[in-house]
Amino acid sequence: MSASRPLRPSAPTPVDADHHDPVRERARRWEAETLAPVLAKNPERKDRFTTLGGIPVDRLYTPRSSRRSFDRIGYPGQPPFTRGVHPTMYRGRVWSMRMFSGFGTPEDTNRRFRYLLKHGESGLSVAFDDPTLYGIDADDPEALGEVGKCGVNVSSLDDMRRLLAGIPLADVTTSMTINAPANILWGMYLLAGSSSRVPFARLGGTTQNDILKEYIAQKEFLYPPRHALRLVTDTIEFATRSTPQWNPVSISGYHIREAGSTAVQELAFTLADGRTYVA
């Protein structure tokens, strides 16, 4: 499919007959300013998308008229990103394929990562063992019997380098399920990338870094909440300045739900310079 293919119009959006309807005008601007540049670089995978029953699925759906506010919902690929971070979402590209993986030594898991990447996986998802999740070194007496179980053990920068040896970090994204010591493990990952001559700005991925989930659900926390949250905001602030392709926090809603939650409340992290990161 050629990247120079002209922009294929979506099915007409049902709006009022008025040609100056704000909804119609905003949809046109979205197609011209947000959608068209993305399609020129990454065309949609098919000319026609349908449901399993064969009903056509349009690229965009909007309100029938401007009488209903659309500001809080927005458009795909535009703030506040409630309709997705990409204008075409998975019509243009499939989602990252990752298998939650980790066991034994860094070398054991490295072999697993290489196997998965060779067989079609497009990213890594690292499972750490309990000592790593609690910030305990492998040779600590408290780690006895738990090293390398249900995840890989990473106690040092050398461990992280061996875990990622030979993996093209500039070409894959990595998800790390780590919370209390997230800043330390993420720092190790960044330095391992630097050792492979991949600059911070080219490293992509996600650090779970959701310490509130630990207090609410899984209970693998290390510090009092106020200090733990300060570490979270510090990592977010660093990411906004130095790692544009990295997501510094991922709210683990399913753990909170399984611990008995019946509602979700918006979380806001205020950085030192006054900016707010909403999750």
Image (cartoon, rainbow, N blue to C red):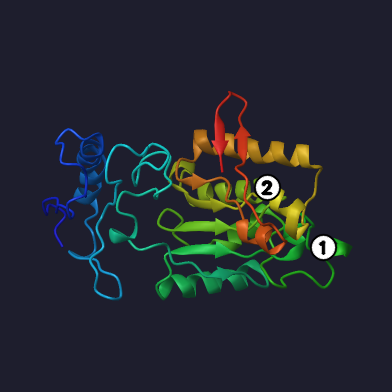
- Local packing at callout 2 (Cα closer than 10 Å; few below 14, some 14-19, many 20+) is some
Q: Is residue 163 left or right of residue 256?
A: left
Q: Is residue 166 visible in the rendered structure shown here?
A: no
| Observer-nearest of 29 and 141 | 29
- Local packing at callout 1 (Cα closer than 10 Å; few below 14, some 14-19, many 20+) is few
Q: Amino acid at mark 1?
A: Asp
The percent position of residue 201, horizontal first and vertical second, equals 45, 41
Q: Residue at x 39, y 49 (%)?
A: 83
Q: Residue at x 82, y 73 (%)?
A: 145
The percent position of residue 225, horizontal first and vertical second, equals 78, 42
- Above or below, 106 against 119 in this view is above
Q: Residue at x 38, y 36 (%)?
A: 71
Q: How far apart are the alpha carbons under marks 2 and 1?
A: 18 Å
The percent position of residue 113, horizontal first and vertical second, equals 52, 69
| Observer-nearest of 78 and 271 | 78
Q: Is residue 182 left or right of residue 134?
A: left
- Above or below, 94 against 74 in this view is below
- Above or below, 238 against 198 in this view is above
Are circles 2 and 1 on residues that touch, CB within 8 Å?
Answer: no
Classify residue 148 by image quadrant: bottom right
Q: Amino acid at mark 2?
A: Ile
Q: Quadrant of the N terminus?
A: bottom left
Q: Is residue 66 visible in the rendered structure shown here?
A: yes
The mark nearer the N terminus, 2 or 1, is 1
- Above or below, 104 against 80 in this view is below
Q: Which residue is mark 2?
A: 184
Identify the element where label 1 is drawn. loop
Q: Quadrant of the C terminus?
A: top right
Disc marking residue 139:
1
Judge depth for marks 2 and 1 and give the one in front.
2
Residue that protrudes farthest toward the top in the picture: 273
